[in-house]
Image (cartoon, rainbow, N blue to C red):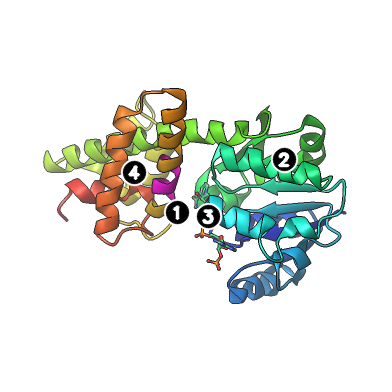
Amino acid sequence: MAKLAYIGLGVMGFPMAGHLAARGGHEVTVYNRTAARAQAWVDKFGGRSAVTPARAAEGADIVFSCVGDDPDLRDITLGTSGAFEAMAKGSIFVDHTTASAKAARELAAEAKKRGIEFLDAPVSGGQSGAENGVLTVMAGGDAHAFERAKPVIAHYARAVTLMGPSGAGQLAKMVNQICVASVVQGLAEGINFGLKAGLDMGLVLEVITKGAATSWQMENRGKTMVEDKFDFGFAVDWMRKDLRICAETARETGADLTVTNMIDGFYAEIQKMNGGRWDTSSLIRRIRKV
Ligand SMILES: NC(=O)c1ccc[n+]([C@@H]2O[C@H](COP(=O)([O-])OP(=O)(O)OC[C@H]3O[C@@H](n4cnc5c(N)ncnc54)[C@H](OP(=O)(O)O)[C@@H]3O)[C@@H](O)[C@H]2O)c1
């Protein structure tokens, strides 16, 4: 049994931390900015909650996090009562936030100065992947630290892979998000097309999910897109943050993101429709009049 800390009990962090306690049997101390959520976690899974990231991280072998964006990650690591100030030498910080590769490299360097290891370890698989403990984790950082953290991460993941040095996990996640954006837009256009043509889209999806057009998005979001349901999953606000990070990186590397940038503009329209917290499959709302 390891001593663990988990910072950030949102849609993703809450169930991930839960698996560490329930499946892993580890001793878990949690921190959440909004204290009621930490209390709800303790009520459900046992363990303890702490009042700051630093207090949660004290004495932990591994500290996990899943917060929002780069500034949030800097707050909980380097900010006042941040985790880094309390972590023991030789311990590991595993960050599951989707953040920039630049932030990952900076934090890895800051961690090294303190004798701590930092792994950027963004995830794919969404809310259901976190709840069912079947996420895909793509990590960047030191190979030895990765091997130590891997069996613990495996409590909520079905694939845990070291992609390369610090930042490589975040870069792999950017590739994932670029691919997801176009797939969701394609699905939105296909479903809207079928509905306008008067097809039974339940039946169409059942059939084409078994063919070449299938995707995670089609399997997991097709039905709810037809039903116009978006009150769950991966928030549009987070997708825009991810696509911003992709665009910033593409400017540095010279990669072409013509279609991805166009879809980012579509997501901006969804935000204007007050859909910032809707699931990313809500792209269909732009083109479908229900
Ligand atoms: N949802 C998905 O399907 C999914 C899939 C893959 C990756 N991700 C990524 O995972 C991360 C979390 O996503 P989520 O859906 O779990 O988000 P969420 O439900 O909005 O939760 C965000 C969590 O971060 C905490 N937080 C944010 N800023 C903070 C700060 N400055 N200081 C301390 N705590 C802070 C929030 O605390 P409060 O409770 O106080 O707000 C909350 O616990 C994001 O980077 C997202 O892009 C999400």
**Is residue 240 one of those drawn in magenta?**
yes
* Secondary structure found at label 4: helix
Left or right side of 118 for 133: left
Residue that numbered label 4 is attached to: 222
Q: From the image, state whether disc 3 or disc 2 is nearer to you.
A: 2
Task: From this view, report whether residue 215 is shown above or below residue 40.
Answer: above
Q: From the image, state whether disc 1 or disc 3 is nearer to you.
A: 3
Which percent across, then down, holds residue 191? 24, 40
* Secondary structure found at label 3: loop
**Is residue 43 one of those drawn in magenta?**
no
Out of 203 and 143, give the one closest to the viewer. Answer: 143
Out of 243 and 217, give the one closest to the viewer. Answer: 243
Which percent across, then down, holds residue 287? 18, 46
- For the residues marked 3 and 2, what is the alpha-carbon distance in whole angstroms? 21 Å
Which percent across, then down, holds residue 283? 28, 46
Which numbered tag is attached to residue 68?
3
At a point 31% along the width and 58% down the height, the residue shown is 275
Residue that numbered label 2 is attached to: 109
